[in-house]
Amino acid sequence: MTTLQQIIDDLTQEAARIQIQGRGLRPDEMARVQAIYEALPHLKKALEILEKKIQSTLITYKIVADLDGKLKQAGRVACNFWNRFVIPNYSVVIRLGLFTSNSNTIARAYKPYERDGVYYGVIEFNTKYLSTFSRNQISGTIAHEIGHTLGIGWNEWEKLFDHSNGKFDESAIQAINDLKDMRVETEYGPGTQYSHWDEERHGEELMTGFKNTTEHVLPVTIEIMSLLGHQVAEKLPNKTDLNALLDSLAQITFSRQGEAKSLNLDHFEETEIWENVPHDQPMSRKSSKKA
Ligand SMILES: [Zn+2]
């Protein structure tokens, strides 16, 4: 079967062949070349439309262990958040569980792993703190970690900015103008460095390395997903308060249970810890460290 791409290539070559004969073109040749050049943009546009991914990927969660259904409730809201704005290039399963430790760590996330095109991220919450956490505190933490699983901090992200100053490259700014004002975190060492928005400049944004009591989401946090291989389903029009956003997303009923069930939710691999959400920063410093 001839593919549309093949037709485009053939026509491009034919037009080139006609034009390199080293003599003036006959009227029928001129007409043919002109017809090809008129057709090509339409054919390319059609190819682009056909190649657009038909939505079949999603972000979902698996409850490994829970406390009074808190993780289930928060996981649902965090997945609603990302499913509303992004059609991911791959499905994501966030595995939510517990650990108990008499330490200052309130949650820990493990390095994502992949199997059969599905990416898995494991997040565990410390039972010592979980009961006192609000739903939005938990879902905000999960939404932050899903942001990483979608590529903030690794893979394509790494190629977008200058590691010496956290500034985005010209080509990235050309694609998303807001990136000219954004800086990547270059301090605080492994785990925080290079995988978050800069704390000093973007303090209370969802994807900075420190958890704040009030947080917001910038439109660019959604838009940059298009540079990480995903499709943006809906742009966030303005800087938006995270609590308000999570509250509105809590009202949405998840309608894609069937698709979620078709994923292998149970696949588990042990990986190294990717981020801790410690409690040991002085709280007076307005934030506790996420990474
Ligand atoms: Zn993080």
Image: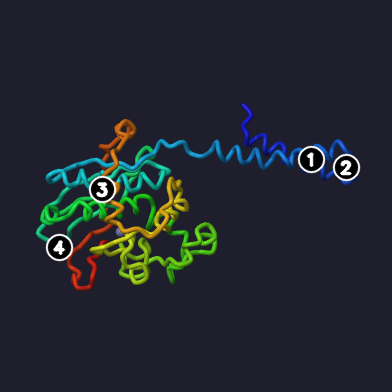
- The residue carrying pointer 3 sits among few (fewer than 14), some (14 to 19) or many (20 or more) residues within 10 Å by Cα, namely many
Q: Give the percent coordinates (x, y) of residue 22.
A: 88, 46
Q: Give the residue drawn at x 60%, y 37%.
A: 46
**Amino acid, disc 3:** Val
The quadrant of the rendering that contains the N terminus is: top right
What residue would you read off at disc 3? 122
What residue would you read off at disc 1? 33
Q: Give the percent coordinates (x, y) of residue 235.
A: 43, 51
- The residue carrying pointer 2 sits among few (fewer than 14), some (14 to 19) or many (20 or more) residues within 10 Å by Cα, namely some
User: Does 195 sit above or below residue 84?
Assistant: below
- Element marked by disc 2: loop
What residue would you read off at disc 4? 104
Q: Report the Cα–Cα distance between label 3 and label 1.
A: 57 Å
Mark 2 or mark 4: whose residue is earlier in sequence: 2
- Element marked by disc 4: loop
Kindly indicate whether the residue at mark 1 contacts the one at mark 2 (C-beta within 8 angstroms): yes
- The residue carrying pointer 1 sits among few (fewer than 14), some (14 to 19) or many (20 or more) residues within 10 Å by Cα, namely many
**Amino acid, disc 1:** Val
**Amino acid, disc 2:** Leu
